[in-house]
Structure formats: structure tokens, C-alpha cells
Image (tube, rainbow, N blue to C red):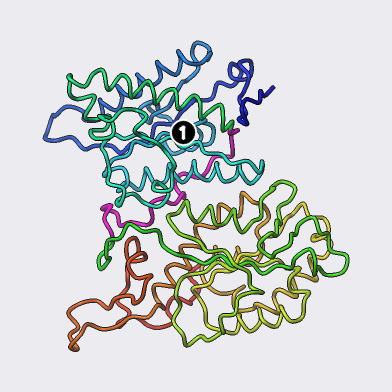
Amino acid sequence: MFIQDGGRVHASSQQRAADQRPYFFLSYAHTPRYGAGGPDPDMWVERLFRDLCGHVMALTDLPAGAPAGFMDREIRSGEGWSERLAEVLATCRVFVPLFSPRYFASEMCGKEWYAFAQREIYHQAKSNRPAEAIVPALWVPVPPEQLPGPAERLQFNHRAFGDRYVTDGLYGLIKLRIFAEEYERAVYELAKRIVSVADTAAMGPSRPLDYRQAPSAFGTQDPAGAPAPGAVRSSGPRPIQVTVAAPTRHDLPPGRDAEYYGDMPQDWNPYYPDAHRPLAYVARDLVRALNYQATVGSFDHDTTPLDSKQPPTRPELLIIDRWALEDEERRERLAAFDAENRPWVSVVVPWNRDDHQSRAAESELSATLEQTLPTKLSQGRAACRAAARGVPSMEAFGQILPQVVEAAAQQYLRHAQVYPPAGGSHTERPRLRGPMAAEYATTHFIPDMLDQAPDAEDTDDSQS
């Protein structure tokens, strides 16, 4: 049973004892050895992990042999590394990232963060109850302006663990004996927070994400972990537009079930009853977990004129309900949009396989979609074409969304306005122009557009 206490939901001791999933996943950036034969620098992280596990065991009624936590050193020799990571990220109760400058430069750490954040988003979508189960810890303090969007948005009071912890981090406390008392206090407070958050969030397990295909929550980086050549550093999240083309419950086609709709197009919830949040806001949270800043709007209320000669101001996701095409005026506007050359707009068409009414009308609705959006249904990468032809579940939507977002972002970079260096010199690459330049240049390679064929990105690259 669950016990209600002051508006928070707590699992009973019987349930906690029966649930032997790890309380926390410790996510950290591996530090390279200094010099040949030097000591293992990650031994201090392992000590922290053991101390946390000891406190968690003391603070809970986990039975003997149950894992209190997980770090990647727990993976046994011969065990599938990516499969094991994916399994634990899909089942652990709390995610504990060890903040450091090296952490946010690590693609692996970004993948771990995204895999867990996706679970939080699914949990909220299905339960209509927020799940905030990321408990950050300071290994080495990081200036706020250097935090990527997903970390910056966390509401967490580090000072509750002590002032010395805030200024020196756990690494400073663990390395200097004079701070031994402060270290013990900080670790104990962190363990208490882990147990409290695990019981409050009460997140159940999910299907493991393919870790090898998972995107990084910190954005795309080059193999060396630094921004790509030609990039300009900026810590701000990258803007993106999420637009919904759907009817409201007040203007539905005759006979269409209203339970999937609300007062605004953005209220459309195609995966009801499995999900209880509008899909536009699930999409917003998913792209925020990819270090984007999303603006949500509706296709019906978008007054921007369709003009392919104007450069884009940001990439866009257009989420379309096939039933929206039953309205003649909306269908004509979507057809006009399809006739424009807007490759920086990725189209996603959710299609709930459990919606019996939609299944019954599938042939007719699909034919209308193909007649209205022939270009978008055949344009771009294989993932983009698959997303435009129908996404059958919320989990499938979450899996394909990072790919279509990245495709839209790359197309935006190729079509955004550029200007040559002053004085006619061509010694520097052309730069993006306008307020979006710095944000996108942070984590994307800006191609040399003066030397690039204008429509090369619109070819069929399904083999890539």
C-alpha cells in the first residue's frame, strides 16, 4: 500500500522490502590516470559509492544481498557492458550525477542522464504526477553558467549539505583529512536525500533504452568531447519550435471520439489512456532533456506566412493528427506548407494502435495524409520518413524523437542565414546570424555553406 503524508506519497516498508531494485545509479566521469603506473584516480569515487551504500542500507530495510546502489565498476568481467547499464538505468530508483567539468564534457554521462530523464518523462505522462528523481552531487564545483540546460533546471539546494561541500565539492572533502567531518556529513545528507526522493517519486521500472543509440542530454559533441570546429561556445539551450496540427474537442470531425482532445490543439493526447498528458508537453520535456528550449504552439494559430525564401529562425517539430486533415481549410494550409521547401521542419504523425476508431479509418486517413504531404512523407532520413508515416506508441515516439530533432537541427544549420567576413575576406567561415547563432554553434558543426551544394541534404540518405 501507499501512505499519504503531507501531500507526498510514500511506499510502505513491506513494499520497499519486496522491491530490491538499486536505490541509486552513480553516474560519474572517469578521470584518466596521470603518468604510467599512477594510482587509479577513480578510487575516490568508489569510496564515495561504498559510503553511500552503507548509509542507504542503514536508512532502509533492504534485505541482505540487495543492491543499495550501482556504479559501473559493479559490472562483472564478461558481462555485456551496454546491456547492463541500460538494465540498471531502466530499474534504479534515483539517478545521482557527480557534477564536475569533466562530467558535462562526457558523452557517456550525457547518455546515462538522458536514459533516466526519459523514464521520468514517461512516468509523468502515464501517471500525470511529476517525477523528480535526479539527485545531483558536487564532485568538483561547476560555475552555474557552465551547466547545460538539463542540469541548470534542477531545483536543488546544495547548501543543505554544508558550506564547505559547496565550495570544495566531495572531491575536496574526501582528499583532505581536515575536512573528514564535513565529508561524513555531506555523504550522510546525500544518502538521506536519495532514500527520501526514491520513496517520494516511486518510479517503477521501464523498458531498457538501447544505450548505444541513446543521445546525450548535453548536446552533440565531436569525438574529443569539445565543440566542433567552427563552433562558438555558449551555455544556453538551443531553441526549437514544437507545433501541433490537431482539432480541439469543439471542432472534431463528425463521430470522432472527444476523449483524445481538449480545449486547445496542444491538448491533444493521442496515446490515451496509456498516457494522461498532452503529447505536445511530453515532446517539450523530451527535447528539453536533449538540451533544447522548446516553444509549444498550434498550426491553426501560427500566423507566420509561408515563404520558402525567408531563412528559418529555428528548427521545428510539426506533430500532426491525421484527423486534423478532415477539415478542408486546415488540409489546404498543410498542403501549402508541404509545397514549401522547409527541410528544417520534421513531421511526426502519432498513430495509436489501440485507438480502435482510428484503426477502422486508417486506410482513408492514410490516403488523405499522403495526398496532403507527399513531400514530407518521402523527404529526409529514414527515421524522418518513418516518423511521418505513423508512430504507434508513446515509447516509440520517445525513441524516434531524438533522431528527427537532430535532423531538423542539422537542416536548420544548413539553411539559416549566413554572412561573409567583412572586407570580402574568406579566411573565416561564415557565421549564423541572429539570436540563435550562439546556441546552435555550441554543439553543432556549422558547415562551410559557401562550398556546399544547396540541396545536398534533401537527398535520400536512408543508407547512412
Residue interval drawn in magenta:
203-227
Q: Is residue 225 magenta?
A: yes
Name the spot of residue 197 as percent of width and height, x first. Answer: 51, 30
- Residue under label 1, please give it: 84
Task: Report x, y in % for residue 457.
Answer: 44, 75
Q: Is residue 129 left or right of residue 41?
A: right
* Coordinates of residue 19 in the picture (x, y in percent): 59, 21
Relative to residue 40, is residue 147 drawn left or right? Answer: right
Residue 407 x/y as whole percent: 47, 66
Q: Residue furthest top?
A: 64
As drawn, the residue found furthest toward the right would be 255
Given residues 442 and 161, the one toward you in this image is 161
- Residue at 67% in and 24% down: 2
Report if residue 16 lies within the magenta region: no
Quadrant assignment, res 422: bottom left
Residue type, label 1: Arg
Name which residue lies at 60% across and 30% down.
8
Residue at 17 percent across and 79 percent down: it is: 427
Q: Is residue 204 above or below residue 454?
A: above
For this view, does 188 lie left or right of residue 143?
right
Q: Of all residues shown, which one is farthest toward the front?
A: 6
Task: Specify the principal SS of the magenta part.
Answer: loop
Q: Please determine whether, in this image, residue 253 is positioned above or below residue 307.
A: above
Label 1 crowd bin: few (<14), some (14–19), many (20+), radius 10 Å: some
Report the quarter where the C terminus lies.
bottom left
**Number of marks in the rendered image:** 1
Helix or strand or loop: what does disc 1 sit on? helix
- Which part of the image, by quadrant, shows the N terminus? top right
Q: Nearer the viewer, residue 264 or 203?
A: 264
Reply above or below: 341 against 112.
Answer: below
Please tell me which residue is depicted at 55% across the width and 52% down the height of the picture: 399
